[in-house]
Image (cartoon, coloured by chain):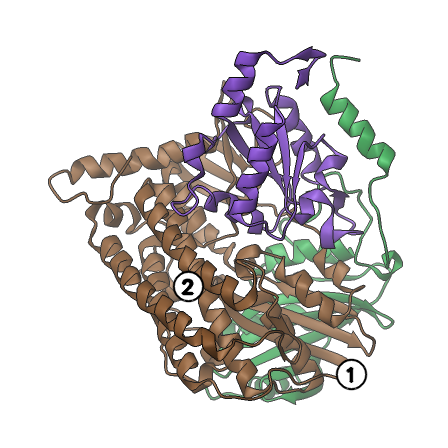
Chain colours: A purple, B green, C brown
């Protein structure tokens, strides 16, 4: 994995892989995907045992979980958050809306899917994707490191 | 109050302001109303007859801008919708917000989407559309029927460059 | 001296317009305003270019938590417009799906409310038992959310008789847990101290601001669409409307939990009484005209209005989600309350979760203090800790901060 043209060192790669901190960004979703992300924290799926934890500020995030289609009002906010996030950061687009515009295609208030505004590393389709699919997607993302 | 027929009460109180009455079913009534008297009539429905304002619907038809005020009489199991038509291209009507607090954001939304001017509204500011949305463009008017892309690819790319690559240019 | 606190999404140090704007004097709130442009996707306009059948999939995604309510309200409107009555079996299936959704939504709310006041155990437990309902939905419809069960004229999928036992078994497991939550919430002195009297609204105010759903019923307003404008099978089963008179966050919690029990009661009767027969009455043509459909969503009254010009697509679809009607109640409920209680009052009307991604920026004219969502939660948890220390001599089974 490269950042600014240099390969990420072994220690950094290990640290990122073993305990990724995820920041959840809602770009304009109906909440189905957001609930499934939160569900992944609850006892049945318990994603915290993998070291994945949700944090409150984007500055410390290793993984950016973006749900929803980007609307006109959220476009500058999504860009600002991506700018604030410390690189390297993996961006995961969750849900049909995040991967492609889905059923909101052609709307006057919609800019487009997430990869139209920020680079995306992993796409997790579904409406909504089940928590198992989200965990699988995040693990695949970590495998890219 | 529970046994009063709301439509009859309206017709008695406003003999000139009430027009056609259509009873589609026992629970759905549509009443044509004079646009100039809407504030008095809506106030009467809310304060005197005890109706609950559900929402207001605006839609553009060939006759003009039609606005429906949907009131619910929960005890009677009846929804009475008042219908007014105001002329285009600059639709304007009295605001009912001074009488019914819940109407404030409803009228702001209709103003954003349809460009209806509600005279006497205490806070006619943007509510539903994004801050970047241009003034004077009302997306729900029939002139915008069909695909309506707001931002071009170039504009999105320009904003992306400006925010993400500032400092490196 | 007045300060304006913008309570908006994402990063605290960015100049941005607010989702909610709260004006405080000292530590007390004096005014509140809000915007809803972030999640606006233009669904009503998209509906004008889709067929009636396609619109059911579209409205399902207005809000993921109410994903049965909007299709039922929409189909009620189409059936009102076309003058069609759906078959009895479809009525019972709609009832079953709607009540399961109500249980799932109220348990979800309970978890979030617990999280906001610092009771993470409640959050974990209620979402764990919510999984029972999600699993049930997956067995009945194929998906945990957005079930695609409803279509104009009836329902899209049947519930096989072989599923009935599984549904009843899940209800048997769920009912004692709901009773446990009721006991835990009503017995805990810190929860009582935290929620009682907070965000209070009088009955007159609730009616003046046209509130609906559990928010109105918690203030003593006796309205419920299932009884006042019967649809599906609600007039064929025995149930009662739950009201409280407190008008505060505690009353809302009680109303929601007791409604879960009523829902279980309705579900058992529906499984018992569901008749054989077709599940759909085809609507060959939608005539010119207009139709209104109303439905009692977990959050309140969901309203859909359709104007038809005789074609396959609606000429105009107007959607009024229940949260919209309850937002003006904030004006009554926030004034005079503490900043530390902002989170729980905002959550108490049970808005879509997207409304609860928050940041607070407190600008008193001389310096800028930034609090992200964690900071605002901290304020709320701090308040719970203060109350807990006052009640330290009493049992603290659930408090984990």
Mark 1 belongs to which subunit? C
- Mark 2 belongs to which subunit? C
Q: Position of residue C232 (x, y in %)?
A: 52, 80
Residue C363 appears anywhere in the view = no
Q: Number of labelled discs?
A: 2
Q: CA distance from mark 2 to mark 1?
A: 35 Å
Secondary structure of residue under mark 1: loop
User: Among all residues in the image, which is located at the extreme left?
Assistant: C393
Residue C79 percent across, percent down from the top left: 66, 81
Q: Name which residue lies at 77% across and 51% down.
A: A105
Going by the image, does C270 lie left or right of B148? left
Front-lying residue, B90 or C189 = C189
Which residue is identified by label 1?
C285
Where residue C386 appears, as percent x and y from the top left, is 24, 34
Where's residue B168, x and y in %? 76, 12
Query: At 72% from the left edge and 51% from the top edge, which residue is drawn?
Result: A102
For the N terminus of chain B, which image quadrant?
A: bottom left
- Count neighbours of disc 2 (C-alpha within 10 A) and say few if under 14, some if 14 to 19, many if 20 or more: many
Earlier in the chain: of badge 2 and badge 1, it is 2
Residue C75 lies in what quarter of the image?
bottom right
Mark 2 falls on what kind of element?
helix
Instruction: Specify the label residue C103 is tagged with.
Output: 2
Compare residues C42 and C51 and report the one nearer the observer. Answer: C51
For the residue carrying disc 1, how many other residues have a C-alpha within 10 Å: few (<14), some (14-19), or many (20+)?
few
Q: As displayed, is residue B22 above or below residue C132?
A: below
Tell me, yes or no, if residue C293 can be seen here: yes
Q: Quadrant of the C terminus of chain B?
A: top right
């Amino acid at each position: 994995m490269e950042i600014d043209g240099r390969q990420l060192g072994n220690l950094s790669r290990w640290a990122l892989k073993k305990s990724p901190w995820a920041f959840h960004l809602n770009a304009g979703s109906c909440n189905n995907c957001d609930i499934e992300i939160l569900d992944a924290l609850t006892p049945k799926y318990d994603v915290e045992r993998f070291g994945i934890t949700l944090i409150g500020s984007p500055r410390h995030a290793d993984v950016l979980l973006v749900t929803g289609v980007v609307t006109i009002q959220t476009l500058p906010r999504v860009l600002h958050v991506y700018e604030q996030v410390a690189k390297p950061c993996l961006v995961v687009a969750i849900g049909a809306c995040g991967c492609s515009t889905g059923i909101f295609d052609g709307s006057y208030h919609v800019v487009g899917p997430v990869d139209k505004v920020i680079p995306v590393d992993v796409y997790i389709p579904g409406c909504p994707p089940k928590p198992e699919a989200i965990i699988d997607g995040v693990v695949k993302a970590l495998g890219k490191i | 109050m529970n046994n009063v027929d709301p439509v009859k009460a309206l017709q008695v109180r406003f003999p000139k302001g009430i027009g056609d009455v259509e009873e589609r079913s026992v629970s759905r009534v549509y009443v044509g109303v004079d646009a100039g008297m809407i504030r008095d009539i809506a106030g009467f429905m809310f304060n005197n007859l005890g109706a609950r304002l559900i929402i207001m619907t605006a839609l553009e038809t060939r006759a003009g801008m039609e606005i429906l005020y949907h009131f619910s009489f929960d005890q009677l199991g009846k929804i009475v919708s008042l219908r007014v038509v105001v002329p285009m291209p600059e639709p304007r009507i009295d605001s009912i917000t001074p009488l019914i607090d819940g109407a404030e954001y409803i009228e702001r939304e209709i103003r954003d989407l349809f460009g209806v001017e509600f005279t006497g509204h205490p806070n006619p500011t943007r509510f539903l559309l994004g801050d970047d949305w241009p003034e004077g463009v009302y997306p729900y008017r029939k002139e915008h029927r069909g695909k309506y892309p707001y931002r071009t690819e170039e504009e999105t790319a320009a904003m992306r460059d400006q925010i993400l690559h500032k400092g490196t240019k | 001296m007045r300060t304006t606190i913008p309570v908006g999404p994402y990063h605290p140090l960015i100049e941005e317009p607010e989702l909610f704007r709260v004006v405080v004097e000292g530590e007390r709130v004096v005014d509140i305003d809000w915007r809803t442009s972030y999640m606006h996707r233009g669904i009503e306009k998209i509906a004008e270019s889709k067929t009636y059948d396609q619109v059911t999939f579209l409205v399902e995604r207005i809000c993921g938590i109410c994903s049965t309510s909007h299709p039922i309200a929409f189909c009620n409107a189409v059936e009102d417009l076309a003058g069609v009555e759906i078959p009895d079996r479809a009525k019972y299936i709609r009832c079953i799906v709607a009540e399961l959704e109500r249980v799932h939504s109220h348990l979800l709310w309970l978890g979030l409310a617990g999280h906001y006041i610092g009771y993470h155990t409640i959050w974990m437990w209620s979402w764990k038992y919510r999984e029972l309902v999600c699993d049930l939905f997956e067995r009945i419809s194929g998906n945990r959310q957005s079930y695609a069960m409803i279509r104009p004229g009836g329902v899209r999928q049947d519930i096989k008789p072989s599923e009935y036992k599984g549904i009843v078994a899940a209800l048997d497991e769920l009912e004692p847990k709901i009773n446990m939550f009721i006991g835990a919430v009503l017995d805990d002195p810190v929860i009582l101290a935290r929620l009682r009297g907070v965000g209070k609204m009088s009955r007159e105010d609730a009616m003046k601001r046209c509130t609906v759903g559990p928010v109105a019923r918690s203030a003593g307003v006796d309205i419920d669409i299932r009884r006042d404008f019967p649809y599906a099978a609600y007039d064929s089963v025995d149930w009662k409307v739950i009201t409280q008179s407190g008008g505060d966050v505690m009353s809302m919690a009680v109303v929601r939990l007791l409604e879960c029990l009523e829902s279980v009661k309705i579900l058992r009767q529906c499984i018992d009484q569901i008749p054989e027969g077709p599940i759909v009455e085809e609507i060959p043509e939608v005539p010119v005209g207009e139709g209104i459909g109303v439905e009692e969503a977990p959050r309140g009254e969901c309203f859909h209005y359709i104007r038809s010009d005789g074609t396959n697509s609606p000429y105009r679809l107007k959607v009024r989600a229940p949260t919209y009607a309850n937002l003006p109640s904030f004006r009554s409920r926030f004034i005079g309350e503490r900043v530390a209680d902002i989170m729980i009052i905002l959550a108490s009307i049970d808005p879509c979760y997207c409304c609860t991604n928050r940041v607070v920026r407190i600008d008193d004219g001389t310096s800028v203090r930034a609090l992200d969502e964690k900071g605002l939660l901290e304020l709320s948890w701090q308040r719970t800790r203060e109350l807990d220390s006052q009640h330290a001599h009493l049992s603290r089974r659930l408090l984990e901060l």
